[in-house]
Amino acid sequence: MKKILWILFMLFLAHRPNFSWAREILQEIVVQPGDTLWSIANKYLKDPKRWNEIVNYNELPTADPTLALPGTKIKVPIQLIKEEFRNAELIRLVPEVKVKPKNGSDWKSAKPNMTLNYEDSLRTLKGGQAQVKFPSKEIVQINENSYVILKPEKILQEIQLLEGDIRASKAKVILPQGTVIRPKGSYSDYQARVREDNTEVVFVYKGKVDVTAKGKTVTVPEGYGTEVKKFSTPDVPKPLPSFPDFNPAELTSEAPTAPRSQNGQGARSLSAPQINDDPTRKQGKAKAVVSEKILANYHVQLAANEKFEKVIFEDIQPTGKVFDIKKKAIPDGTYFMRVAFIDALGARGSFSSPTQIIKDNVPPLINNLTPEDGAHFEGEEYYCDVIGTVEGAAYISVNDEVIFISATGRFSKFVTLHDGMNVIRIVARDVMGNETIKERKVYYNKR
């Protein structure tokens, strides 16, 4: 009896899909009017006879392959689908990003959440950036001035990088000279770039990758990079810079929790990073030396939470230039900021730990201010009393003299008057440096 049950169990497994990958790698197909399981299988599946496996992944009103299905989306294991029907999804873009379908001749503006099919091309222009999600759930970042051809083929998808640079983890990448990058192990994080002089570079931040060119393969481990010059084989991997540890708020024009000075607080100057000069280093025994590579840029990202589940803003700016959140086109609010440095050769460091940063462009309010503009005073009393209330101010000054603000926001100050017109200047400033300035012109006539 046990033997019979075992045989039945093995037969059951033989006719069921491989759930170890099927649970993870499914693609949605839109059912068109009149579609049946047979017509869908004939169009999309490499082996149409496996139409019945679609039933295992969907709750369908019928399993009869000849009956039309209602308009819906069905899920199909990616390994069953013909290469030309496998797709990726454009989950995020920063304009301008252009897309061109396979065999198409015209570039069109890309749209968020659009489907990208096998051998579709994507181009990012200056300032543009795109993130593409493949059926394997890998998210590939395509940076500005880049040109790629996407091939969501098999479990390990392929990307052809013709210009610019991308950051990937599982994808096999093919560069213009035919250089092939293959990730090794369960997870990698690497950047591939084509420079203007056609040199191809690969930087590995996590895991390791194989880089093959002109019949030679080198394995690039975590924390190393390699170059492939034109018509050459890959260079021996060299260590990447280890970038300085810092608080991202130090790159902002002001500290988010303290009032700034009149001229604002500049970003600190950054020293050159350190690298290990020994390519055979072992963990914990590296000799650090000062790199001759100067920090060139920093990549800044803002998100609503510390997990950076959704990046709200990002930009690449030269080091030495402050990051002024007040000038960015995002709503006022509290954000989390992280930064990755980029050296002169294009190597990127890891992102820093997030730090909180506030955008607040709302100035303080000055209310109930006396005297009125144009008020006249005369007689022996050669002063007037400046009185008012303020909301949201860290301090207030009258004619450049800082005065006390009560718990209720009230302030007052005696101002000495001279014959003729007097200008009284009231300045309220909050912790973010926002200012409200009011002036009163008053007149004094001594009898």
Image (spheres, rainbow, N blue to C red):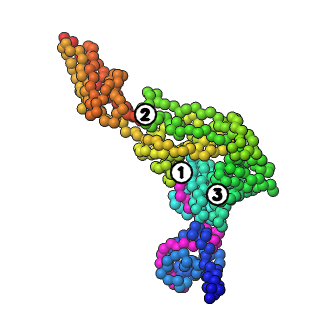
Which quadrant would the C terminus be assigned to in this image? top left
In x, y percent, where is residue 146?
63, 51
In the displayed structure image, the side of residue 333 where residue 387 appears, left or right: left
In x, y percent, where is residue 180?
73, 57
In x, y percent, where is residue 301?
53, 46
* Dot 1: element: strand
Q: Give me the C-alpha separation between circle 2 and circle 3.
A: 42 Å
Q: Residues within 10 Å of mark 2 (few under 14, many from 20)?
A: few
Residue at mark 1: 94
Residue at mark 3: 187
* Dot 2: element: loop
Foreground label between 3 and 1: 3
Residue range (magenta): 66-95
Question: For residue 346: magenta?
Answer: no
Foreground label between 1 and 2: 2
User: At x 58% / y 78%, what residue is drawn?
Assistant: 53
